[in-house]
Image (tube, grey):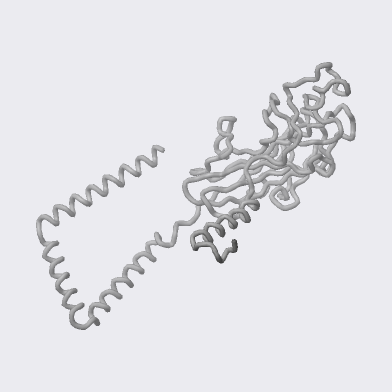
Amino acid sequence: MGLRNLASHQRVLLLACAAVLLWAPTQASAGWYPPRPIYDYDKTPRTGNCSDPGDPTAANSRCGPLDGPVFNSFINTPSYGDERAFLDGHPASEEGAAFIADPLDVRDHTEIVVRLYVNNNANEFWGERTTATGTRVRITVPTGTRSGLRIRGYIEADNAVPTVVEDTLDLVADRPFRVEYVPGSAYLERQSGTYGLTSEIVEDRGALIGDVNMNGIFPAGFDRDAVVYARLRVIPADPPVFWNQRTFWLVALVSLLAMTIAVLLAPGKPRRLAGHYTARAKSLIMTQTFAQQLIIGVITTALIAAVVYLARLLL
């Protein structure tokens, strides 16, 4: 049966479904990516020998991968937990684990700190082949203005499998906002010290990271893991033009002028009707009942506004 033979409502439904199917694959999902083998820190090889081919528990245990660099694929680690969810953040004015969150509420905050955890999970006892080369980190800074924005973090290396891993951080607020990178704020921190990173961290290529030198050489081992920090400025959107006071009064004045001209130029009946309703309105305003109702209305409006304002302060 062709599309022409369908009823109009059926054609609309069919086209809507097709649009959804075409649109859906382009939407980016939240969370870590891509799917990859997971290594469990709580799971130790039965024989204690990671290279024992007869021990099936060695493959995805605390031993980690044996054939090269793999980033952020451990779960149940004592220092971080699930390494796949490696991107989160906290308000710049509030330090400590209690304030780290994803999603992160950014209302009433002018700056936030984005935090990205990096760990090369290869078993360092297998030597040089476990060291990652060309290692970079990248944070995408959204360019839109909305009440919800998504940041993506990437870790990549030339010889890692997979080459790139990513995770997301959602920022939310009760009104539209935008964010921008604070130049010079990115740095890497590990046991050996703190090291500055270039502003390439928010560019397409990403910033090189490393051990002591930020040259892309990133060795394996839990004692070499690192945390990357970068600051973003939170900028509330400008209020709509409608609420601009000058614009509001200009529109009101033009509207009143247009209505007056229309009444004055209208022949016959429209002018008589305008005069009639103007007289009725004048007589109503002059009555005591109208004055009482007006006062009650003003007081009620002020009380409601005060309650709403206090509720917003408390919440």
Q: Give the quarter of the figure containing the N terminus.
A: bottom right
Q: Position of residue 224 (x, y in %)?
A: 78, 31
Looking at the image, can residue 193 be seen? no
The x, y position of residue 302, in whole percent, is 26, 48
Q: With 314 as the anchor, is 31 left or right in this view?
A: right
> Residue at the spot x=26%, y=49% of the render?
301
Q: Position of residue 273 (x, y in %)?
A: 17, 74
User: Residue at left 54%, top 54%?
Assistant: 145
Relative to 244, is 127 on the left or the right? right
Q: Which residue is found at the position 65% from the left and 39% from the top? A: 87
Judged from this view, the residue extending furthest toward the top is 47
Quadrant housing residue 77:
top right
The one of 61 and 147 positioned closer to us in this rendering: 61
Q: Is residue 92 above or below residue 17?
A: above
Q: Which sits in the foreground, 27 or 297?
A: 27
Task: Farthest residue to the front: give it.
Answer: 1
Task: Give the image quarter of residue 166.
Answer: top right
33 left or right of 177?
right
**Where in the figure is residue 51, as x and y percent of width and height?**
88, 24
Q: Is residue 255 above or below residue 71?
A: below
Q: How many marks?
A: 0
